[in-house]
Amino acid sequence: METLLQLSPIVAAAIPVILGLVEVVKQLGLPSKFATLAAILFGIAISWVLGNVWPAFLTQGILMGLASSGLFSGVKKQFE
């Protein structure tokens, strides 16, 4: 359970990477309404690649995806 919600520097660095990947996929034609789902899927994939165990990579990946989605929304709202 210790590693389930552990925020390492790699995880913190993965959040902007996920944001960039989602923007690339949106430029390739993904509708904006699926951006959050894409962010969650990218987060799960990155967490799995980092070598986390079963419940940890799923939970941490969802949290990374939602964090990147929230980062995008927050920055977008500030510049409107």
Image (cartoon, helix red, strand yellow):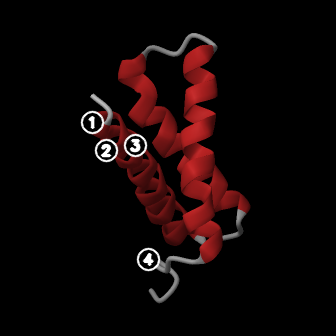
Please identify the residue farthest to the front as the structure is shown: 79
Disc 4 element: loop
Q: Mark 3 or 2, which is nearer the eye?
A: 2
Query: Relative to residue 18, is residue 29 depicted above or below?
Result: above
Instruction: Point out the tag, 4 or 3, that comes first from the N-terminus.
Output: 4
Q: Position of residue 29 (x, y in %)?
A: 57, 10
Disc 2 element: helix
How much space separates mark 4 and mark 2, taking CA atoms? 22 Å
Q: Quadrant of residue 20?
A: top right
> In the picture, which quadrant includes the C terminus?
top left
How much space separates mark 1 and mark 2, taking CA atoms? 5 Å
Are the residues flagged by discs 1 and 2 in contact, CB closer than 8 Å? yes
**Circle 4: residue type:** Leu
Q: Position of residue 5 (x, y in %)?
A: 43, 77
Query: Residue beneath label 2, please?
Result: 74
Q: Position of residue 79 (x, y in %)?
A: 32, 33
Query: Residue beneath label 1, please?
Result: 77
- Name the residue: 58% across, 45% down: 18
Disc 1 element: helix
Q: Mark 4 or 2, which is nearer the eye?
A: 2
**Circle 2: residue type:** Gly
Instruction: Point out the tag, 4 or 2, that comes first from the N-terminus.
Output: 4
> In the picture, which quadrant includes the N terminus?
bottom left
How much space separates mark 1 and mark 3, taking CA atoms? 12 Å
Query: Residue beneath label 3, please?
Result: 69
Query: Residue beneath label 4, please?
Result: 5
